[in-house]
Amino acid sequence: IGAPSGAPQPTVTAGSDGALDERVNNMGQEELKVELERMMDDMNLGEGKRAPIRKLDDTTLKQMLATHYRRIEVAKNVPADGDLPDGPKRGTPEYFIQELH
């Protein structure tokens, strides 16, 4: 996967979370492969969908992982009922109007 050894590796800058970007950018080849498989497991992808992803370059794979990690972090911060603390309750007319905007 990716650039020949010794070649400089491009960095991921797809988001604003520096810690995630740093973590992904510092991954070695083996860790990148392991995390990629874990991400595809999380997404319940079949082998037919996994094969083309495995062929992508390192930069693209790192961007995918960084995005996946961000989604996990966002999901951790949403309450179980799906209502955000400062917004209207789900199922109310106010919630529906907010969702339309």
Image (cartoon, grey):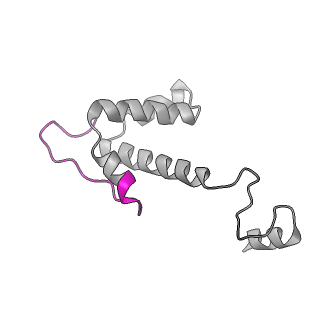
Give the residues in magenta: 1-20
Whether 13 is among the magenta residues is: yes
Horizontal placement of 89 versus 38: left or right?
right
Residue 12 sits above or below residue 41 on the image: below
Picture quarter containing residue 92? bottom right
Q: Position of residue 55 (x, y in %)?
A: 36, 34
Give whichever of 55, 9 is nearer the camera: 9
- Count the marks: 0
Picture quarter containing residue 61? top left
Give whichever of 14, 84 is nearer the camera: 84
User: Magenta residues: mostly which secondary structure?
Assistant: loop
Residue 72 sits above or below residue 5 on the image: below
Give whichever of 46, 12 is nearer the camera: 12
Residue 95 sits above or below residue 80 on the image: below
Whether 52 is among the magenta residues is: no
Residue sitting at x 73%, y 55%: 82
Horizontal placement of 98 versus 76: left or right?
right
Looking at the rendered image, the quarter that the C terminus falls into is: bottom right
Horizontal placement of 12 versus 47: left or right?
left
Residue sitting at x 21%, y 40%: 3
Q: Residue furthest top?
A: 47
Q: Position of residue 1 (x, y in %)?
A: 29, 34
Residue sitting at x 83%, y 73%: 94
Q: Position of residue 83 (x, y in %)?
A: 74, 60
Q: Position of residue 87 (x, y in %)?
A: 74, 70
Residue sitting at x 27%, y 45%: 26
Horizontal placement of 47 versus 59: left or right?
right
Picture quarter containing residue 27? top left
